[in-house]
Amino acid sequence: MDYGQILKTIQDSKPLDDWRTKHRGKTEVRFYVRDVNIRFETTCHDSDVHADPFVADWATRYPDSRARSYYYNLYYSATLIARFVLVAVDNARASLPVPDFVTKKIAPLDYKVAQIFDALGTLDEYMERSGLIAP
């Protein structure tokens, strides 16, 4: 499977049906059930912190205004393929993809990654409250 096929597989996947979660210590792993070589990993370790605090008006407008962003690492087998960033907002009640800073539009693949990690089912509500535009 090449890079483009991996990204297309993720984009075409169904977040609730096609992904499973496992925990390895402080590492959260989401793997694709149709090809377990495709997986995302993230941790609460400093190595996966992108920005703390994450400062943007759309991310800090909540009762708990502190936002922190994390890397979500995409692997195929043992190979790191790509890194995505999601921003934990409102005391981690939602993890939002980073939009284009001018248009506030979310890239389709970034939105899909956020859907895959939307354990609380709050993604779309928080995107709307933040003024972010889904693809």
Image (cartoon, grey):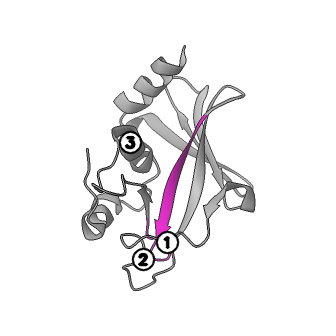
Would you name the residue on which mark 3 appears? Answer: 112
C-alpha distance separating marks 1 and 2: 7 Å
Residue for point 44% across, 44% down: 113
- Which callout, 1 or 3, points to the residue nearer the camera? 1
Could you tell which of marks 1 and 3 lies nearer the N-terminus?
1
Q: Main secondary structure of the magenta part?
A: strand
Provide the secondary structure element on which disc 1 rests.
loop
Provide the secondary structure element on which disc 2 rests.
loop
C-alpha distance separating marks 3 and 2: 22 Å
| Badge 2 density bin: few <14, some 14–19, many ≥20, Cα 10 Å | some
Q: In the rendered view, would you say 17 is above or below 36? A: below
| Badge 3 density bin: few <14, some 14–19, many ≥20, Cα 10 Å | many
Residue for point 58% across, 73% down: 53
| Badge 1 density bin: few <14, some 14–19, many ≥20, Cα 10 Å | some
Would you name the residue on which mark 2 appears? Answer: 60
Q: Position of residue 132 (x, y in %)?
A: 28, 59
Q: Is residue 5 left or right of residue 132?
A: right
Q: Is residue 86 magenta?
A: yes
Q: Position of residue 36 (x, y in %)?
A: 58, 27
Q: Between 119 and 41, which is closer to the camera in this rendering?
A: 41
Residue for point 36% across, 52% down: 100
Q: Position of residue 89 (x, y in %)?
A: 45, 70
Q: Residue furthest top?
A: 1
Q: Residue furthest front?
A: 102
Q: Which residues are magenta?
A: 82-94
Q: Quadrant location of residue 64?
A: bottom left
Name the quadrant of the C terminus.
top left
**Which amino acid, by three-letter code, is at mark 2?**
Thr
